[in-house]
Image (spheres, helix red, strand yellow):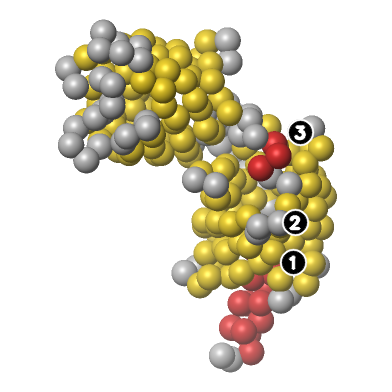
Amino acid sequence: MKDLKFVNKPFLSLQVLVLTLLLVPALAPGQSTTSLTGKYEGTAKAPSGDVKLTLDLVDEGGKFSGRITTSANVYEVIKGQLVDGLLSLELQGKETSGKLAVRQKDGKLVGELSAHGETGSIELSKVVARDDISGQWDGTADANGQPFPFLLTLKVDGEKVTGASSSDLGTSPITTGSWKDGKLVFVLDSANGQIGMVATIIDGKLVGDFDLSGQMTGKWAAVKRKP
């Protein structure tokens, strides 16, 4: 287990309205307030030796995705479920599969990891990298299949997030925002109303969802500009 091989005018006006609002919707009804989304680091222990690894986990209302990364391999989360507090993930690498079963305990994910015919204990701690958030991000929102670019400027002070989003349609300040437990949540105040966005950091990028006042939902992503 050392490697864990384990245009008409009405239509145009509607487009402008939609694109303007795209730049924080209210969170979707029923969205869990105890999301497991985030990056975790830890060690899996087995008879053949210890393996250090990271888990990038995305929890979208109980639908799980992400990946486990070791020094030698990457394993995608192909299926997951949370039942009675037990998170079970099925993993698939290039040459092998595995399973992760963990529970939350004292702020950590604790349980067992199975791969290569071995099962060992595992303990994962969430990584909180606030310094990775502050700065300028080049973002793109998916507006009904059409890319909508914008520049997002963020500043983190403790758990509070401030800043603004700018695009060809103008600048929208962040009225409320937070960066907590690996999750970014903020609200933009545009000329046509408020917009809400949520995201986590995956592979160095901000990746998340938007909800346009309950009228339209979709994905957005952003890459941080180099200083």
The quadrant in which the N terminus is found is: top left
Residue 89, x across and y down, in percent: 33, 27
Q: Is residue 209 left or right of residue 118?
A: right
Task: Let me know if residue 188 appears in the view.
Answer: no
Residue 110, x across and y down, in percent: 45, 13
Image point (28%, 21%), residue name: 2
Q: Give the residue at mark 2.
A: 153
The quadrant in which the C terminus is found is: bottom right
Label 3 sits on a secondary structure element that is: loop
At label 1, the amino acid type is Ser
Asked if disc 1 and disc 3 are in contact, CB closer than 8 Å, the reply is no
Q: Nearer the viewer, residue 191 or 102?
A: 102
Task: Estimate the spatial distance between the alpha carbons at disc 3 and disc 2, rounded to whole Å.
Answer: 16 Å
At label 3, the amino acid type is Glu
Task: Estimate the spatial distance between the alpha carbons at disc 2 and disc 1, rounded to whole Å.
Answer: 8 Å
Task: Estimate the spatial distance between the alpha carbons at disc 1 and disc 3, rounded to whole Å.
Answer: 23 Å
Label 2 sits on a secondary structure element that is: strand
Asked if disc 2 and disc 1 are in contact, CB closer than 8 Å, the reply is yes
Label 1 sits on a secondary structure element that is: strand
Q: Give the residue at mark 1.
A: 166
At label 2, the amino acid type is Thr
Q: Nearer the viewer, residue 12 or 56?
A: 56
- Total of numbered circles in the picture? 3
Give neighbour class at mark 2: few <14, some 14-19, many 20+ (Cα, 10 Å). some
Residue 156, placed above or below residue 14 = above
Residue 7, x across and y down, in percent: 56, 90
